[in-house]
Amino acid sequence: MEHVLYYLVFPGLIFTGVAGLLVTWVDRKVTARIHWRKGPPLLQPFWDIMKLMGKEITVPETAKATGFLLAPLFGFAAVTLASTILWMSLVFPEKGFSGDLIVVIYLLTIPAISMIYGGSASGNPLSAVGASREMKLILAYDLPLLITIFAVIWKSGMTLNLSEIVTYQQMNSPVLYSISGVLLFVAALMCIHGKLAFVPFDAPEAETEIVEGALLEYSGPALAIQKLTKAMMYFTLPVYMVILYWGGMNFGTVGSGIWSIAKVIIIIVLIILIKNTNPRVRIKQIMKFFWGPITIIAIIGLILSMNGL
Amino acid sequence: MDIMNILQPSNLLCPLILPAIVGFIILLIPKKVKYVSEFFALATTAYMLYVGFTLFGIKDAAVSYPWVKVGPLALNLDLVINQFSSFVVLFIAFFGLATVLYSIGYFRKEGANPRYYSFVLWTLGGAIGAVLSNNLIMLLIFWEIVTVLLFFLVNLGKNKENLAAAKSFAVLGITDAGMTFAVILIGILYNSVTISELSIKVDGFLPGLAYVLLFIGATAKAGAMPFHSWIPTVSESAATPVMAFLPASLDKLLGIYLLARISLNMFELTSVIYTIMLIVGAFTVLLSVLMALVQHDIRKLLSFHAISQVGYMVLGIGTGTVVGTVGGIFHMLNHSIYKSLLFFNAGAIEKQTGETDLSKIGGLARFMPITFVTTVIAAFSISGIPPLNGFFSKWMIYRGIVESKGIIFLAVAMFGSALTLASFIKVLHSTFLGAPTEVTKKAKEAPLSMITPMVVLALLCVLFGVFASYPLNNFILPALDKSAFGTIDTEAVIGASSWTPDLAAVLMLVGLVVGMIFFYLTKLTKVRTTKVYIGGEVPDTSEMRYSGVDFYKTIRELKIMGAAYSDAEKGWFDPYFVVAKIGNSAIMGMKKLHNGVLSTYLSWCLIGLAVLLIFLLLV
């Protein structure tokens, strides 16, 4: 029962949801400042979700309605669980289990799968294009991301346990503070960016071309859940990066607590900067980019870390 | 020994003799009499399942019947049931029942070939015999019975059947010959061919050779690279229930069972052998899943997955760790479940639409809802999506790989899993989702006798994932306990008690319910149906259909991948093809020498004689 509480309140649903929406606010605010605009007020993301909840649901006549409407819920449930496991490793390290890292990796793929499924189930050809691109995007970033994760496992004393990885890094030094660590961090940041499907890797959504792809036919509460899932991913993935590559978080003292939160914000700001200073590229270019330079960087990082650099 | 005694469910001979006898009875039934052979087959397999349960309850028994005795060579029918073989026998019987039940629906229109059910029953008996025998020679005989029956069953298929059947027989026959050689070698070296008596240390060339030959035989049956190529060829022509029965489930159970037996009980392996196993596993996973990604025919696509999943099992056993081995064997069980389910689904689609080409079907979800749901479960299970069974066994294999410090193999295994997912997204999109085609608009749900095994298997996929500790504690851990690993620490293998897969599933469910409440709080009741939006164009979905077939064309267009694909499609990764090429050119070369001119022949003879003489003089 206590696990359900963790899942629903902290660090699960409510905490991740609120934090995720706040992150989207940071995103919109910083983007606006880059554009020399004023930007939305703090509560705007919440109002947006509230507004969508009140709208009607439309389902295209070609769609398989049940699957189409259920798909977003699976992504939503999975990202909540992933966030719960990640935070549990920080807050209650003793509750971790061997192999939770792999569970998290898989859970963080489910939101993308549910997008693909929903887009595919809508029967809209543009959504189908979006779905196929989303899948190719997963394939593209998965290879380098996995390599960086294995380098981290190697550097953290061959464990698949998140809390042990964090403890190891806090006892010794974070992965990032080494030559190989920097390379791994850069590769992983690119992969996280791809996972969020932001510009320049936003081929699966591409508003100007395929009208948000898989999201095209969603409306009302279903769209609200999709947006909320995306917002939660936007918060969970930087946390995940901090845990794996930057020594995790430590709320022992006020100073270390602030520094922990600052790490997450730094990663978010890096993502926002990349997002706002690059043009969109085609899916083939994305695959070449990830399977070419990024994989090579990740492999160099892996080799260097195997040699203790 | 009277016949009633043999048919007692607790008798080890029963699962061998009963199907053999009923198989012959079915052969005698005239073709015009309908449903009798189906009834016999169904009743027999149901009884076999009961026998399987009874034997599973016994868990420890051995019988020995003296059979042939020629001079010093004594051949005994040694049957042993232990914790490992009992659960494999149980599942072989289970898949036998599922296949027969499914076949009744599958062949209901044209009627099955009268020999079909006999062959299925004999295969069942042969497979159980191979699992129960404690004598390597008897094991080989039963093993060969299964191979021959595969040849016959494939031959009953529709087109190009002889070529495919011949290829499967050639590949498996050669590897089986290798196994025979290994058994002879073991017999000579260690004076025994009884599995439980052998404990061979792989330290020299000969024991190494014996192990490698047995390894090749076992993995060729299961379908690991490089002796995999018979599975895709067979898939082009064999009837779908045959695919579900042999390459998808029984051959996996047999092959991996033998691999586990030789690796854990018979031989003491060195790290070199383990590394070879890891390499074989990794190559199998990656290369065949890449091939699966670009297939257009659903059965061929599934057959490539049947190969790539074997890679995971070999990887698991190749780690040499407890977790990895348990995971590998659990994956064997899970794979048999979801892969036979996938072939059953493919067969249902094939029967109801008459098509197996992915580009010609689509939007079936509305017409075949039950098949759709079972396919989704099986597809996500094979892709390793938590909390389904495929995830749990893969998770254990990954942990095993990390324990054995093979980081690069972990990368291959996990990336292979992503590619598997990609290829099943393509299957789901092009068969069930997307827009319907002319063929699929008239499709109806499959009949009950096909649906029933599908639903049962889908339920097993979910249950073995959510309550994974149940099959692990009852089937797999007892099987491996006190083998090469000594007593197994259950807690360490399944995971700490604070977090179990069923808890994760419950939490996922809570998330779903919360999402549902969101929906209900709003206006789900007033769902409005609209036309699809295609950027303002008039929606004509039959014209603008985007089939899943070309989902991954981009990957082909990348330079390196394209080259690899064209090589693979020409057959250069297929030993059968390569050997055929070499053999062909050798024969062509010799053919040129055969020019019919007597003087040339005579000069060849003289040259040969001269060489012989010189050789004799020098020695």
Image (cartoon, rainbow, N blue to C red):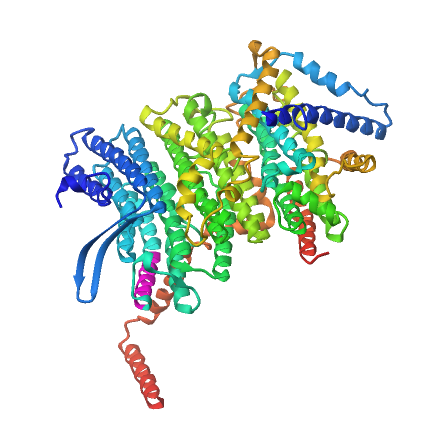
Camera-side residue of B159 and A123: A123
Figure quadrant of residue B199: bottom left
Q: Is residue B372 visible?
A: yes
**Considering depth in this image, is A228 or B465 the residue closer to the camera?**
B465
What is the x, y in percent for residue A159? 62, 47
- Nearest the viewer among B579 and B74 is B74
State the extent of the magenta-drawn residues as a range.
Answer: B174-188
The quadrant of the rendering that contains the C terminus of chain B is bottom left
Residue A260 relative to residue B211: left or right: right
Q: Position of residue B321 (x, y in %)?
A: 50, 51
Q: Mostly what secondary structure, the magenta segment? A: helix
Q: Residue furthest left?
A: B2
Q: Residue at x 49, y 46 (%)?
A: B489
Labels in figure, total = 0
Q: Residue furthest top?
A: B526
Residue B186 counted in the magenta span: yes
**Is any atom of residue A266 visible in this view?**
no
Above or below: residue B182 compared with residue B390? below
- Residue at (37% x, 55% y) in the render: B217
For residue B247, above or below residue B169: above
Question: How far from the left and from the top, in percent, is residue A267?
Answer: 76, 37
Q: Position of residue B407 (x, y in %)?
A: 59, 51
Q: Residue furthest bottom?
A: B617
Q: Is residue B526 above or below residue B254?
A: above
Q: Magenta stretch containing residue B530, yes or no? A: no
